[in-house]
Amino acid sequence: MTTTRPGPRERLIEAARDLTYTHGVHVGVDAILRQADVARRSLYQHFGGKDGLVAEVLRSHPARARYDEVMEKAGDDARARVLAVFDELEVVTTRPAFHGCRYTTADVALTDPAHPAHAEVRAFKDGLHELFTAELTRHGHPDPEFGADQLLVLIDGTLAHAVTRPDAHPALAAREMAAVLLDRAGARR
């Protein structure tokens, strides 16, 4: 049986996805090239350089699809769908290989405001905001946009807190706070 090896572009993305998560976005280009087993020329041909590669890693990462998948599996009830996200965060944040949110970490680490990764982080976070706004609208929340902001604060807090205090199980605490937010909204209908 013959397997086809992914092309240089895909290998660069996969190597950068792995290395920038485990070692941060400032990981060296040589380490990425070595893991991807590609020549430096391929990096510039496909991405224009490391900045473009980091931006593509964030753009193409399936994190948003994972949120959608988790919510879909939770059924049709908007409350259950939102709380399922926190259940999944408990699973994710307690894994030994958990290093935090790749989007927030990249945004904080990249101090150049013109770095293309910042736009990808913003697009990802805006997409999550839209997702939760839609769910809260379905739930009858009186201010779904503000409620979505609150949920994102809980999610970001969970992901950050789990890096420094994983044994505290911040996803469980955040889930309880999300339930309060959802229940208050339901009571105001």
Image (cartoon, rainbow, N blue to C red):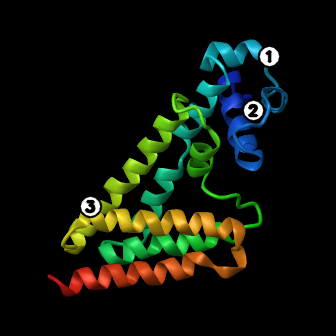
Task: Give yes or no for contact between labels 2 and 3 (Cβ–Cβ under 8 Å).
Answer: no
Residue at mark 1? 39
Residue 116 location in percent, x, y? 52, 29
Q: Closer to the camera: disc 1 or disc 2?
A: 1
Residue 102 location in percent, x, y? 61, 50
Q: Residue at x 27, y 84 (%)?
A: 184
- Residue type, label 2: Thr
Report crowding for label 1: few under 14, some 14 to 19, many 20 or more residues within 10 A (C-alpha). Answer: few
Q: Residue at x 33, y 64 (%)?
A: 148
The quadrant of the picture occupied by the C terminus is: bottom left
Frontmost residue, 185 versus 86: 185
Task: Give yes or no for contact between labels 1 and 3 (Cβ–Cβ under 8 Å).
Answer: no
Specify which label sits upstream in the sequence, 2 or 3.
Answer: 2
CA separation in Å, label 1 and label 3? 46 Å
Report crowding for label 3: few under 14, some 14 to 19, many 20 or more residues within 10 A (C-alpha). Answer: some
Report crowding for label 2: few under 14, some 14 to 19, many 20 or more residues within 10 A (C-alpha). Answer: few
- Is 146 displayed left or right of 111 in the figure? left
- Residue type, label 3: Glu
Residue 87 location in percent, x, y? 53, 75
